[in-house]
Image (cartoon, rainbow, N blue to C red):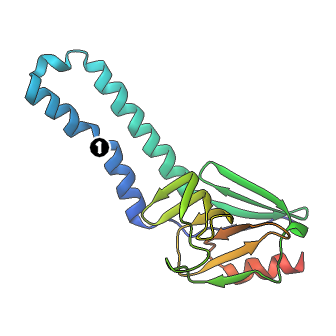
Amino acid sequence: MIRDFAIVPPRKSAFVTLAALALLPLPVFAAIAAVQGVGALQPAWIFVVISAGLVAFVAVMSWSLRRMRVRLADGRITVRASGYRRRLALSALDLDAARILALDPSSEWWPRLRMNGIGLPGAAVGHFRASRWHRKLFCALTDRSRVLVLPERGADRALLLSVEKPQALLEALRRG
């Protein structure tokens, strides 16, 4: 049986930050034109290519941040989060140690160091290290007020998920 669980959509601040990143080259090119003259921007196609690339990047990122999900199927959990994917057998999870909590910066589970991921206001997605540096985290965090922490057995690894119904996911995991 396949069961999907939605991840809480990121807050508006994540998308505003992405839009700001796309618009960032505009004032840079305007400053170059003001200081060196419009002739400095003669190869206008460079400006168009860079701007189009950034707009495409922001569009893909926005789309992928809205399509994050957790799937339970065939004794496995699969987390798809904005281009990142983590797949584990349910037997690899320590469900007795799993819990739902509110993350704050003093928490031992707080993602401190981004190893390979996306860090935006209101979204932390990908691979991080916790405050205990040896602990590896795979995060799909968009709402830190209700985070499902799923530690792996015999490893200093865990999944941190901002699912819309964390208790329902935890119960489904325990049922197998």
| Label tally | 1
- Residue 9, position in %: x, y? 53, 66
**75 lies left or right of 35:** right
In the image, what residue occupies the spot 71% across and 64% down? Answer: 70
Which amino acid is tagged 1? Leu
In the image, what residue occupies the spot 39% across and 51% down? Answer: 18
In the picture of the structure, the residue carrying the numbered disc 1 is 23
Residue 81 in the image: above or below residue 12:
above
In the image, what residue occupies the spot 70% across and 67% down? Answer: 159
Crowding at label 1, few (<14), some or many (≥20) Cα neighbours within 10 Å?
Answer: some
**5 lies left or right of 75:** left
From this viewpoint, which residue is outermost toward the front? 133
Residue 171 in the image: above or below residue 63:
below
In the image, what residue occupies the spot 48% across and 52% down? Answer: 62
Q: Nearer the viewer, residue 172 or 25?
A: 25
Screen quadrant of the C terminus: bottom right
- Residue 155, position in %: x, y? 81, 66
**90 lies left or right of 112:** right
- Residue 73, position in %: x, y? 85, 62
Indicate the quadrant where residue 134 lies.
bottom right
- Residue 34, position in %: x, y? 8, 30
Residue 47 in the image: above or below residue 174:
above
Give SS at disc 1: helix
Screen quadrant of the N terminus: bottom right
